[in-house]
């Protein structure tokens, strides 16, 4: 039995990861400051004998004894990470240093939840891990994008300089149950709007694309990466190569919810990437991983969840 620390464990992805790790027979220490995470995401785990919750902000050092770390702490939705951009960069950079320092002291493996945002508004399509990105260092997304890029740098420097075993995962848009209904991300926004019969808010002309991965596929990829062969560090893209425009997504959600909602077009936020699609050859080769859940099926499960919470 391993003792596994999950930072950001009360968030959307973190809570699903805690479920998986407990199911595999591990002890889980969930570390979260509840900035975007919610007790309801982990409520069902609070009485589990192998689950422990610690309210803690990763920008402060943490001294605990564990065998493995998944570093997920960081708000992921643009409205949340732009709410306090300085804190977002601190969480990514200082949070990564604190978690890496812990991994170094304990000589344990650590996984970083990085992001497709390191590619910025990509000029290469689809995006392989070798692409170095096109990020505006001055824009409103930079606190997140540059914070995550710097965290990747720290991971590789701790690896080279101190021999810390690292795994770096570049996550593309992931959706599913336990997304925050008000977190402003496109899938949750459209589903909530469709279920309430409100206007569906399309930013720009809706022709920008994203690739949406269902949460169970993401967690399988994360778990496989942590348990991949020694010496395999990544970075590795984990996402679903199916590519959809926001208009296609909106229409699919309207159909699945049988909604009478109308589309409204609002201004495109600054630096909003026009296209996003992962090359997943590396994940296939190294992790024997590829997504299995189609957008329609994943949306159906997500809609069921939101019907229960709103
Ligand atoms: P989320 O906002 O639901 O979860 C993030 C969690 O981190 C929350 O529980 C929050 O309270 C916690 N947190 C934030 N700042 C903290 C701090 N300073 N100290 C301790 N805890 C803190 O987001 P998510 O979608 O679950 O994302 C999890 C990770 O995956 C993030 O690092 C995010 O950048 C990355 N990621 C997610 C996606 C996606 O589509 N969901 C895509 C790319 C990368
Ligand atoms: N988007 C939209 N309407 C919304 C929320 C988002 O059209 O109500 C668009 C947004 O402009 C972006 C895409 O959907 O082009 C994905 O946005 P999200 O915030 O989910 O993720 P990210 O931009 O970080 O990939």
Image (spheres, helix red, strand yellow):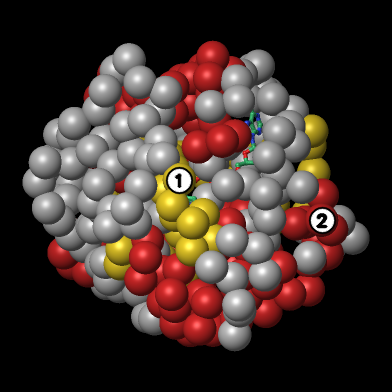
Q: What is the quadrant of the C terminus in the image?
A: bottom right
Could you tell me which residue is drawn at 59 percent across and 85 percent down? 258
**Extreme right residue here?**
47
Q: Nearer the viewer, residue 85 or 13?
A: 85
Q: Quadrant of residue 306?
A: bottom right
Bin the neighbour count of mark 2 within 10 Å (Cα to Cα): few under 14, some 14-19, many 20 and up.
few
Q: Position of residue 142 (x, y in %)?
A: 37, 23
- Sequence order check, earlier mark of 1 and 2: 2
Q: Which mark is residue 266?
A: 1
Query: Of circles 1 and 2, which is in front?
Result: 1
Above or below: residue 34 compared with residue 194 = above
Left or right placement of residue 30 versus residue 110 in this view: right
Q: What is the quadrant of the N terminus in the image?
A: bottom right
Label 1: element kind = strand
On whether ligand 2 comes within 8 Å of the CB at mark 1, the answer is yes
Determine contact: label 1, label 2, CB under 8 Å: no
Tally of marks = 2
Q: Nearer the viewer, residue 190 or 59?
A: 190
Label 2: element kind = helix
Cα–Cα gap, marks 1 and 2: 32 Å
């Amino acid at each position: 039995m391993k003792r596994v620390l999950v930072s950001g464990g009360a968030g959307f992805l973190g809570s699903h990861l805690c479920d998986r790790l407990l199911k595999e027979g591990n002890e889980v220490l969930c570390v979260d400051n509840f900035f975007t995470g919610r007790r309801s995401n982990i409520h069902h785990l609070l009485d589990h004998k192998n689950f422990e919750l610690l309210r803690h902000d990763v920008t402060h050092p943490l001294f605990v004894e564990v065998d493995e770390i998944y570093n997920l702490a960081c708000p992921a939705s643009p409205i949340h990470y732009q709410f306090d951009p300085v804190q977002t960069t601190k969480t990514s950079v200082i949070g990564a240093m604190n978690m890496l320092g812990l991994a170094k002291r304990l000589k344990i493996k650590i996984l970083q939840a990085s992001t497709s945002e390191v590619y910025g508004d990509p000029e290469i399509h689809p995006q392989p891990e070798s692409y170095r990105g096109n990020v505006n260092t001055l824009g409103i997304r930079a606190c997140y994008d540059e914070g995550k890029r710097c965290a990747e740098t720290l991971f590789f420097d701790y690896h080279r300089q101190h021999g810390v075993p690292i795994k770096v995962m570049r996550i593309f848009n992931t959706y599913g149950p336990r997304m925050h209904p008000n977190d402003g991300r496109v899938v949750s926004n459209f589903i909530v709007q469709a279920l309430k019969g409100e206007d569906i808010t399309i930013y720009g002309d809706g022709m920008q694309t994203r690739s949406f991965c269902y949460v169970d596929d993401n967690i399988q990829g994360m778990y496989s990466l942590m348990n991949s062969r020694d010496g395999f560090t990544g970075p590795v893209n984990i996402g679903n190569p199916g590519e959809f425009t926001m208009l296609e997504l909106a229409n699919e959600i309207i159909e699945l919810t049988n909604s009478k909602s109308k589309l409204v077009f609002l201004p495109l936020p600054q630096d909003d990437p026009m296209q996003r699609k992962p090359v997943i050859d590396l994940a296939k080769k190294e992790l024997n991983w590829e997504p299995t859940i189609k957008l329609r099926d994943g949306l159906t499960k997500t809609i069921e969840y939101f019907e229960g919470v709103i």
